[in-house]
Structures are given as C-alpha cells and as structure tokens.
Image: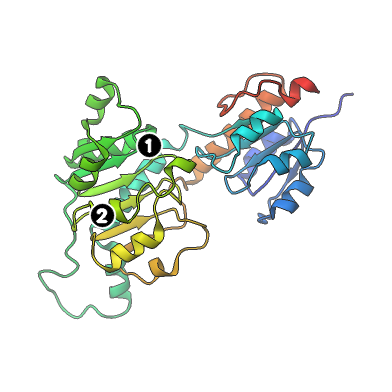
C-alpha cells in the first residue's frame, strides 16, 4: 500500500476540518496553537509534503531549501504576504490562498469598525465603565455622521466592493474609490461608486477605509503626508494589513487632531501594537479579527484543505497564487 502524503497544520483550526484532512493525509496538527519560531517550523516541516498556514508563518527561500519535500503551502487567508511567492515559484512549490469565503464577513466588520470609530463607541464605553457619566450634555461624545457622508475606499477588490454596497445601499453614503485599475461600469453602478484620484480620495472622504493588499510597494501607502491631506473631521479605518499605514505617523496625527479618529484591526509588527496608539482615546483597536466568525474561519480552513487535497491528489489547486514552472510534485 502506498503511503499517504504527510501534511502539517501550523496553527489550530476548526476540528471538523482536521477530521476531513485526516481522511486523506498523515496529519501532524498544532491544535495546541503554539506559535513556532521559523527554526521550529522548519524542523516540523521535515518530511512534509504540504502545510496549512494561517498567515503568520513565513515561507521563504531559506525555509524551502531546508524542506526539500515540501510541495504546497495552503494559506487560510486571502492575503499571503507571509509567502515569498518568487522564492516559492523558483523552488517549485505551489502556494494557495483563501479568497471569497471571507468577503462578506470582513466587510461586515469593516463597516462595524467604521461606525464604532465615527460614533466614538469604545471611548464612550470606557467613560461609562469608569463611572464618569454623571449627567446629559448636548455634545457628550458627539461623533461624525455616517449616513449621507462620503465613504472613501482605497483598494476596490471584493471586500472593498462589499463595503461600498453597504455604505451606498444601506446608509445612503456617497462612495468614492481609488484602485490600481478602474472597475467596470457595471460594477461601479452596482456599488454606486465613483472613481477618483488618490489625492481626491484623501481630501474628500469623511471616512476612509483601507482594503488594499500588502506588497513592498504598498508599504506606508498612508503616511504623514497622506494623513495631512485628509479632512480634520475624517476617520481612517484599516482592515487591510499592517504596514499599509505608518503607525507612528498615524499616532502623532491622532494626538494632534490632524484627523478625528481611526479604527485599526491590523498593525505593523503585530501582535505588538505601537504604545503611542495604545495611549490614545480616539482610536478603536481590535486584534486582527475582521474575518473572525466561526462559520467564516471554518470555511477558510476548508478552502485551504481543499487546495491541499486537490494538489496532493494530482489535480490543479482551487485558488493558486503562483504557477511553478517545474513543481516539486512533478519532479517527484
């Protein structure tokens, strides 16, 4: 009898998906959810044909050289900036991600973060819990309007479009966006969105939501100069990736009231958060949970599992992020 392929699950995932994978593979699972160092990950990948990653495991040339049997890395996230795609392609290793299944859930959270930021929900709750609420005032935690305001979106992929639809159709917002490429007229009509330059987006939006993928070129897309271009009453929401925003510049701008407030689900160097952000009351902070519902996280893990089952079963992956010219699978 031929031995089954061996896979590693690098962090804890839904037990139901582990059970599915165990029907097809010899599985080593990190259900204790220990965050391994790069060296520990490389050690555990010895002899493995595939790995299910969660976005925090770096797959680079050094790791691939140390794990010559590895054929596929399946990320259970739509982003894959933890992958050195060029190194994987050169080494003949397939990479996959998990798009689509988290679009609506992430858009829900992005809009929730926008509303919490605009309406000062975190700040006012802390005030109440601290026993500081003594009487009514007309301006007590008066925030920014959401309905009828201008929603700006930087990065108009699936999630950006879903946020645009919520704003336009649900809250009567005027939607403007900037993207590397303009949407089709049909998609613009569906989102009720108007394409503008990046500068117009920054200067016009009442609420700016960042949903662009992280690349080296996108590092600090929003820095001190960009924040200074925004309205002093504006809010900035980041559900994209840490590094898109210069967190130091943002913290300084928030302290100086260059803009009114920010809502952040992602950070540079996470899980560490810059202490200047932690000290501010006009920023809502959440621990990278935009896609975190049980159903969505299960669907993300299942899509990663589907990619592993397809590729290691000799079929094309479901959602590839690269096309190795000479895969290790074929070479073996």
Q: Which residue is mark 1?
A: 159
Q: Which residue is mark 2?
A: 235
Residue drawn at x 45%, y 31% as measured from the top left? 100
Residue with the most extreme right position: 1
Say which of 293 and 291 sits in front. Answer: 291
Colour pattern: rainbow
Determine crowd level at label 2: few under 14, some 14-19, many 20+ residues with C-alpha closer than 10 A. Answer: many
In the rendered image, which quarter is residue 310 located in? top right
Residue 282 appears in the rendering: no
Residue drawn at x 68%, y 51% as measured from the top left? 31
Label disc, if present, on residue 252 of the rendered structure: none
Residue with the most extreme left position: 138
Residue drawn at x 25%, y 54% as measured from the top left? 235
User: Is 331 positioned to the left or the right of 19 in the image?
Assistant: right
Q: Closer to the observer: label 1 or label 2?
A: 2
Judge whether 70 appears above or below 207 on screen. Answer: above
User: Is 227 positioned to the left or the right of 271 in the image?
Assistant: left
Q: Position of residue 166 (x, y in %)?
A: 27, 39
Of callouts 1 and 2, the N-terminal one: 1
Judge whether 229 appears above or below 170 on screen. Answer: below
Say which of 153 and 250 sits in front. Answer: 250
Judged from the image, the secondary structure of the residue bearing numbered disc 1 is: helix
Residue drawn at x 72%, y 49% as measured from the top left? 41
Which image quadrant: the C terminus?
A: top right
Q: Position of residue 125 (x, y in %)?
A: 30, 69
Residue with the most extreme front position: 225
Determine crowd level at label 1: few under 14, some 14-19, many 20+ residues with C-alpha closer than 10 A. Answer: many
């Amino acid at each position: 009898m031929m031995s089954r392929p061996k896979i590693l699950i690098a962090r804890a995932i839904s037990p139901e998906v582990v059970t599915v994978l165990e029907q097809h593979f010899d599985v080593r699972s990190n259900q204790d959810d220990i965050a391994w160092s790069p060296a520990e990950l490389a050690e555990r990948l010895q002899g493995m044909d595939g790995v299910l990653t969660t976005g925090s495991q770096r797959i680079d040339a050094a790791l691939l050289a140390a794990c010559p049997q590895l054929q596929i890395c399946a990320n259970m996230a739509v982003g894959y900036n933890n992958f050195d795609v060029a190194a994987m392609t050169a080494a003949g290793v397939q990479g996959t991600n998990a798009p689509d299944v988290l679009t609506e859930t992430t858009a829900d959270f992005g809009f929730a973060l926008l509303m919490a930021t605009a309406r000062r929900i975190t700040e006012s709750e802390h005030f109440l819990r601290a026993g500081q609420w003594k009487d009514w005032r007309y301006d007590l935690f008066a925030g920014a309007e959401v309905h009828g305001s201008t929603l700006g979106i930087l990065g108009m992929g699936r999630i950006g479009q879903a946020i645009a639809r919520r704003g336009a159709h649900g809250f009567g917002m005027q939607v403007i966006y900037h993207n590397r490429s303009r949407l089709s007229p049909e998609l613009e009509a569906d989102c009720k969105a108007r394409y503008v330059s990046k500068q117009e987006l920054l200067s016009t939006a009442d609420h700016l939501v960042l949903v662009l993928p992280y690349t080296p070129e996108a590092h600090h897309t929003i820095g001190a100069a960009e924040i200074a271009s925004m309205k002093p009453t504006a809010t900035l929401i980041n559900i994209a990736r840490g590094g898109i925003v210069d967190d130091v510049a943002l913290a300084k701008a928030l302290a100086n009231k260059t803009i009114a407030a920010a809502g952040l689900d992602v950070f540079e160097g996470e899980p560490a958060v810059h202490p200047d952000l932690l000290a501010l009351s006009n920023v809502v902070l959440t621990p990278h949970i935009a896609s975190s519902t049980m159903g969505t996280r299960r669907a993300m893990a299942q899509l990663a599992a589907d990619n592993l089952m397809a590729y290691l079963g000799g079929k094309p992956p479901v959602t590839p992020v690269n096309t190795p010219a000479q895969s290790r699978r074929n070479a073996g």
